[in-house]
Image (spheres, rainbow, N blue to C red):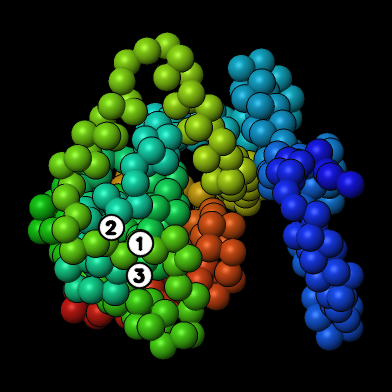
């Protein structure tokens, strides 16, 4: 009996048919205990089965992303409360915080989504050629340089960093890119220079590059030693690889057109969904902290002491402060609290210990070790440098 996928055998000699039948009858069936059964293939078109579903039928329904939808609902409620200007005092603070986060971060999030869509069309080989070989000093320098030069807020940078990892950047390059990026863009650098002066600004940038390079180098060495997982998306470049044809191919895929732009929008939204859930969650948590924790408590505890350093670290970990907001706060810590070390910790620890970045790294790398490497490697460096700044500024 022939299956729906097979074709009938061509006519042949009867002796050949009898010989083939005897051979089939004499075959020994596989032992299901010692030998795995051969893979069964149906007549259906091969496709990846959905979770809990068959290959040809409909799979199980995807579970709702409760964190995304609950955070989005609370965020929209906060925006509505801000616009209606009704309710108790804490609700006003929560709503104003949601509105402030939207105004400060929308452009970075939007640009990040566009970057995610574009990077998704860039071959992994081209990303590897631009960033250099993972685990190398040149690759780390290129990742840090890209982070410093890219003019985006920390939420947009986070999306770009996760996309670079998916396209083959090493874990060390990804961490170095994230640490060097959030407040080192050109526009924010000029704002910071106007607030605290060029001397402090250049010192902070130089020290942040040092932290990014050391963190990336340690992470890559731990990956080489097998202590941290390697990037499964890593790409080995052929010796004769040329960037020109690949770049022209990317440009052709971005040709103008309503249909292509609609596809880019869908790809950007789908690729950013994993990060958006944590961004919205961070906005909501920041609003709740500001609504229920008095601001005076923070202002009185950020003095130029060791305790002030650790409290600054705690505050910047809990508060989801966008990069545009971190510069003025850091300036206040330097000029009003006379604590430049705290200002540096506030700027750097926001990238090193931010739970949005940690959870996004966890979802992207699928490894707690890889995600926790960001704060565990970089935070001690940030605290040490903050303490040294305080010590030598007395």
Question: Counting other residues with Cα less than 10 Å from the Cα at mark 2, is it few (<14), some (14-19), or many (20 or more)?
Answer: many
Residue 177, percent from left and from top: 31, 58
Residue 284, percent from left and from top: 63, 41
**Residue 38 position (above or below residue 17):** below
Rendered residue at 85%/69% (across/down): 22
Q: Secondary structure at mark 1?
A: loop
Q: Which residue is mark 3?
A: 172
Relative side of 100 to 73, left or right:
left
Quadrant into which the C terminus falls: bottom left
- Residue 85, picture quadrant: top right
Could you say which disc has been placed on residue 262 in the image?
A: none
Q: Secondary structure at mark 3?
A: helix
Relative side of 309 to 58, left or right:
left
**Residue 35 position (above or below residue 82):** below
**Residue 262 position (above or below residue 7):** above
Q: Which residue is mark 2?
A: 128
Q: Earlier in the sequence, mark 3 or mark 2?
A: 2
Q: CA distance from mark 3 to mark 2?
A: 13 Å
Assess whether mark 2 and mark 1 are in contact (beta carbons under 8 angstroms): yes
Could you say which disc has been placed on residue 235 in the image?
A: 1
């Amino acid at each position: 009996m022939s299956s729906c996928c097979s074709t009938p055998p061509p006519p042949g000699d009867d002796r050949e048919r009898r010989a083939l039948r005897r051979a089939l009858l004499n075959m020994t069936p596989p032992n299901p205990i010692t030998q795995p059964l051969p893979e069964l293939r149906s007549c259906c078109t091969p496709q990846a089965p959905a979770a809990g579903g068959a290959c040809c039928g409909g799979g199980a329904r995807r579970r709702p992303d409760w964190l995304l939808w609950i955070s989005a609902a609370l965020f929209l409620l906060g925006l509505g409360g801000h616009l209606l200007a009704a309710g108790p005092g804490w609700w006003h603070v929560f709503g104003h915080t949601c509105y402030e986060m939207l105004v400060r971060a929308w452009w970075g999030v939007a640009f990040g989504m566009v970057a995610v869509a574009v990077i998704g069309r860039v071959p992994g080989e081209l990303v590897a050629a631009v960033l250099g070989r993972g685990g190398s000093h040149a690759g780390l320098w290129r990742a840090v340089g890209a982070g410093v030069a890219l003019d985006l807020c920390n939420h947009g940078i986070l999306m770009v960093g996760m996309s670079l990892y998916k396209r083959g950047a090493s874990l060390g390059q990804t961490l170095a890119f994230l640490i060097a990026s959030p407040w080192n863009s050109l526009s924010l650098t000029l704002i910071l220079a106007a607030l605290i002066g060029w001397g402090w600004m250049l010192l902070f940038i130089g020290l942040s590059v040092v932290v990014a390079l050391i963190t990336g180098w340690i992470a890559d060495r731990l990956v080489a030693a097998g202590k941290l997982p390697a990037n499964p998306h890593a790409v080995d470049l052929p010796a004769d690889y040329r960037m020109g044809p690949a770049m022209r191919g990317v440009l052709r895929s971005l040709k103008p057109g309503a249909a292509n732009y609609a596809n880019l929008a869908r790809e950007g939204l789908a690729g950013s969904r994993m990060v958006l859930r944590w961004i919205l969650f961070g906005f909501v948590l920041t609003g709740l902290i500001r609504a229920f924790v008095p601001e005076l408590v923070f202002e009185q505890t950020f003095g130029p002491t060791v305790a002030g350093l650790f409290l600054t670290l705690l505050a910047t970990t809990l508060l989801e402060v966008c990069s545009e907001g971190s510069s003025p706060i850091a300036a206040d810590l330097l000029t009003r609290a006379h604590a430049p070390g705290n200002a540096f910790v506030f700027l750097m620890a926001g990238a090193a210990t931010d739970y949005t970045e940690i959870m996004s790294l966890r979802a992207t790398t699928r490894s707690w070790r890889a995600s926790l490497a960001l704060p565990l490697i970089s935070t001690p460096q940030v605290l040490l440098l903050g303490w040294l700044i305080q010590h030598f500024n007395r």
